[in-house]
Amino acid sequence: MNNEVKAATLNATTIQTADMSLVSILGAAALGLALLFAAGFAQASVMHDTAHDQRHAMAFPCH
Ligand SMILES: [Zn+2]
């Protein structure tokens, strides 16, 4: 493998890694914002019931 091919391969790998990092960052940001807005605008009873259902789903004894 000559140096030109090595450089091209390295550049392609670097760009692909950067693309995946950007996708990961944007995905995490979108998920975080969705959770933030869902929690911020949900009714208190809805939040309580959701937390309660989650507790039951985790087999945590509550009542
Ligand atoms: Zn319960």
Image (cartoon, rainbow, N blue to C red):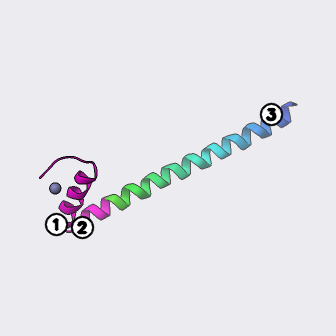
Q: Which residue is mark 3?
A: 6
Residue at which label 2 appears: 42
The magenta-colored residue range is 36-63
Q: CA distance from mark 1 to mark 3?
A: 59 Å
The residue positioned 43% from the left and 58% from the top of the image is 30
* CB under 8 Å between discs 3 and 2: no
- The circle drawn on residue 8 is none
Q: Where does the N terminus fall, quadrant-wise?
A: top right
Q: Nearer the viewer, mark 2 or mark 1?
A: 1
Ligand number 1: quarter of image: bottom left
User: With 40 as the anchor, is 13 left or right in this view?
Assistant: right
Which is the main secondary structure of the residues drawn in magenta? helix
The type of residue carrying mark 1 is: Ser
Q: For this view, does 44 lie left or right of residue 31?
A: left
Q: Identify the residue at horizontal 59%, vertical 48% (top origin).
A: 20
Is disc 2's CB within 8 Å of ligand 1? no
Q: Which label's residue is closer to the chain start, 3 or 2? A: 3
Q: Position of residue 33 (x, y in %)?
A: 37, 59
Query: Which is more toward the observer, 11 or 57?
Result: 57
Q: Furthest-right residue in view? A: 2
Q: Is residue 9 left or right of residue 29?
A: right
